[in-house]
C-alpha cells in the first residue's frame, strides 16, 4: 500500500496564498483561483455583492492562514469525508 492511500496532508501558513492555477501546487493546498472563481460563478446568484478576483483569492487564502506554519497529517478517510462536505 502506498502512503497516499492511507494519509494526506493539509497545509496552513501565516502568509498562505491561493494557488494561481497555472502550476500544480502540491498536495495539501487550497483550490486554485480559477476553481474558486468557477464555484463562485455557479453560486453567485445567492450573493448580491459581486466579488473581484483578489477578494475571491483572499477568501480562499484566509481559510488556510494560521499564526504558525502547520502541516496537518490526516487519515485518508478523514480527507474524503471533508471533501464530500464541500
Image (spheres, helix red, strand yellow):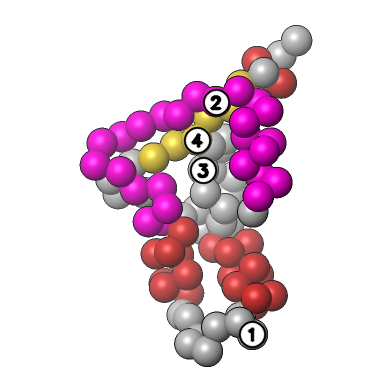
Looking at the image, residue 74 lies above or below residue 26: above
Place of residue 9 in the rendered image (x, y in percent of width and height, measured from the top left): 53, 29
Q: Which quadrant holds the C terminus?
A: bottom right
Report crowding for label 2: few under 14, some 14 to 19, many 20 or more residues within 10 A (C-alpha): few
User: Of callouts 4 and 3, which one flags the residue occurring earlier in the amino acid sequence?
Assistant: 4
Measure the C-alpha gap from mark 1 to mark 3.
Answer: 27 Å
Measure the C-alpha gap from mark 4 to mark 1.
Answer: 30 Å
Q: Nearer the viewer, mark 2 or mark 3?
A: 2
Q: Nearer the viewer, mark 4 or mark 3?
A: 4
Which residue, as the protein is rendered here, is positioned at the far left?
67
Q: Which residue is mark 4?
A: 10
**Contact (Cβ within 8 Å) of mark 1 with mark 2:** no
Measure the C-alpha gap from mark 2 to mark 4.
Answer: 8 Å
Looking at the image, residue 28 lies above or below residue 7: below
Report crowding for label 1: few under 14, some 14 to 19, many 20 or more residues within 10 A (C-alpha): few
Query: What's the magenta region?
Result: 61-85
Place of residue 17 in the rendered image (x, y in percent of width and height, measured from the top left): 40, 53
**Residue that appears at 67% across and 38% down:** 81
Numbered label attached to residue 45: 1
Q: Which residue is mark 2?
A: 74
Mark 3 element type: loop
Q: Is residue 55 visible?
A: yes
| Residue 34, image quadrant | bottom right
**Contact (Cβ within 8 Å) of mark 4 with mark 3:** no
| Residue 39, image quadrant | bottom right
Mark 4 element type: strand
Is 39 placed left or right of 25 in the picture? right
Q: Which residue is mark 3?
A: 29
**Contact (Cβ within 8 Å) of mark 2 with mark 4:** yes
Place of residue 8 in the rendered image (x, y in percent of width and height, measured from the top left): 59, 27
Which residue, as the protein is rendered here, is positioned at the far right?
1
Mark 1 element type: loop
Amino acid at each position: 500500500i502506498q502512503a497516499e492511500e492511507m494519509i494526506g496532508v493539509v497545509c496552513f501558513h501565516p502568509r498562505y496564498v491561493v494557488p494561481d492555477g497555472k502550476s500544480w501546487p502540491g498536495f495539501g493546498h487550497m483550490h486554485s483561483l480559477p476553481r474558486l472563481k468557477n464555484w463562485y460563478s455557479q453560486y453567485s446568484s445567492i450573493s448580491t455583492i459581486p466579488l473581484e478576483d483578489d477578494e475571491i483569492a483572499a477568501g480562499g487564502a484566509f481559510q488556510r492562514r494560521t499564526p504558525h506554519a502547520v502541516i496537518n497529517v490526516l487519515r485518508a478517510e478523514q480527507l474524503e469525508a471533508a471533501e464530500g462536505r464541500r
